Image (tube, helix red, strand yellow):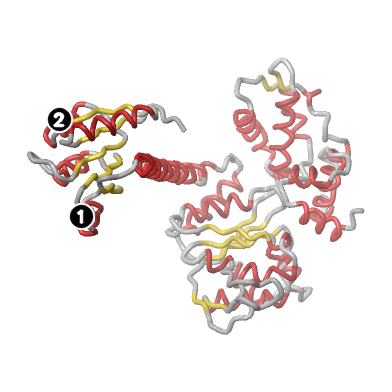
Amino acid sequence: MKKYNYKCLLVDDDINLSTVISHQLQGLGYMVTVANSGTEGIDKFKADFFDFALIDLQMPDMNGMEVLNFIRSFDEKIIIIIITAYGTVENAVQACQKGADDYLTKPFAREQLFFTIEKALKFRQLEKENLRLYFELEEKYQFDKIISKNKKMISLLEIAGRAAQSDAGVLITGESGTGKELLARAIHHNSPRKDKSFVTVNCPSIPETLIESELFGHEKGAFTGAFRDKPGKFEIADNGTIFLDEIGDLKPDLQAKLLRVLQEQEFERVGGVKPIKVNVRIIAATNQNLASLVRERTFREDLYYRLNVIPLHIPPLRERKDDIEILTKHFVNKYSDHELKIHPPFLQKLKDYHWPGNIRELENILQRTIILCKDNELREDCLDLQITDKNISSTNTTSPMSLENIERQAIIDALNANNGNQTKAAKQLEIPRHTLIYRMKKLGIS
């Protein structure tokens, strides 16, 4: 694989060896600057930028360790590989302690040289990518990145910001598509646990026979197919946050085990007897009325109060119509690489719609409309894909649709839009296919 634009500083007093190494690296596309003494190496380092340096350990005027110390004091990111004819463990350990990334022992094969350099470059690239993703997450999940000018939402985000600084239980309620997971991630990424894991569990998407193992792990031989020990989501989330989505679908026996984790911060794996201690913050979410489930005795009252220390209810989009314009502009900027003109009737038609699928549905419709629109304009006649009279909000409506009916209508709309194809409908709704099938059975949709 040919390398481009990587610049190498080669510092070695062996002129013949440095000539050979330089020729080999240039053959791969590296740009090589050669210095035949430690002093010359430092001068050339000062005069240019380098991605990596190959430094001989034993040189007469200034040894490689001194060159290493000088370079590392000015550049923490440059890759440094030590070359030594005295390949003892002590030399290697000392060089790595002083900041070397790796070392090569003379004589070494050309393939060994290439492999060592490539491995170091890939590792450093991975570090850069991880750092980029870290800052991207930091940026993405700030509370001010959750777009809203609605008074209820602004108040909600202020409470969520204060909740993030504690370990108190948080219960996020709201219809499907309102952004419950986005809010949960924002709480985690603004908490003292932000550098630890955020683990998501979608409770209804996991088969009943597997959910206990998924949450708490299992021991080898606990059941057929348990060929090895497996940690569960709670172990993976240790010192971080676990997000239990659609907690209302959790079965009573697992509710009891979850209550123990909340109270004692410990559990046993399936088939295990040794208690496992964890330090996990739990954020739960549901689109169901847990208080009603408690009255119906299908959800534990003690667990409900443990989870519901800080309740956060995200209002549906139809109750925050003042956000539709700002959200529309956001999604247009997200999915269009050029400026689009948004006609007022287009916006009005969006505001008149009932939005059973909430923000997720708005995003999906806008993404599709942007792809299909002509002349770089979003006009009212572009919105003829899923906007139907039965989904238009009416000021004369005396009783709003129930949560169950809204969910049923969102699923039916998605199936109709995809000619009954469950895989495509699930993708549009942004849920796994088996979750869609589960919800269809639950809601009686054939």
Kindly give the residue lying farthest to the left in the view shown: 61
Q: Nearer the viewer, residue 123 or 360?
A: 123
Question: Where on the picture, by quarter, is residue 341?
Answer: top right
Residue with the mark numbered 2: 43
Seen from the viewer's position, the closer of residues 181 and 19 is 19
Q: Residues within 10 Å of mark 1 (few under 14, many from 20)?
A: some
Residue pictured at 60% horizontal, 68% vertical: 307
Q: Percent position (x, y) of residue 238?
A: 49, 66
**Whether residue 298 can be seen here:** yes
Residue sticking out furthest to the top: 375
Residue drawn where x is 86% and y is 59% of the image: 441
Q: Does 334 sit above or below residue 184?
A: above
Res 124 seen here: no
Above or below — where is 22 with respect to 415?
Answer: above
* Residue visible at 25% across and 33% down in the picture: 9
Viewer-side residue, 219 vs 168: 219
Indicate whether 436 appears above or below 397: below
Going by the numbered disc 2, the residue's amino acid type is Asp
Left or right: where does residue 189 sit relative to residue 256? left
Q: Amino acid at mark 1?
A: Asn
Q: Secondary structure at mark 2?
A: helix
* Residue that numbered label 1 is attached to: 91
- Between 148 and 225, the one lying in front of the other is 225
Q: Quadrant of residue 191?
A: bottom left
Residue, far right: 446
Position of 198 compared to 19: left or right? right
Estimate the x, y position of residue 100 in percent, counting from the top left.
Answer: 26, 48
How far is the residue under mark 2 from the one under mark 1?
25 Å
Percent position of residue 27, x then y: 37, 27
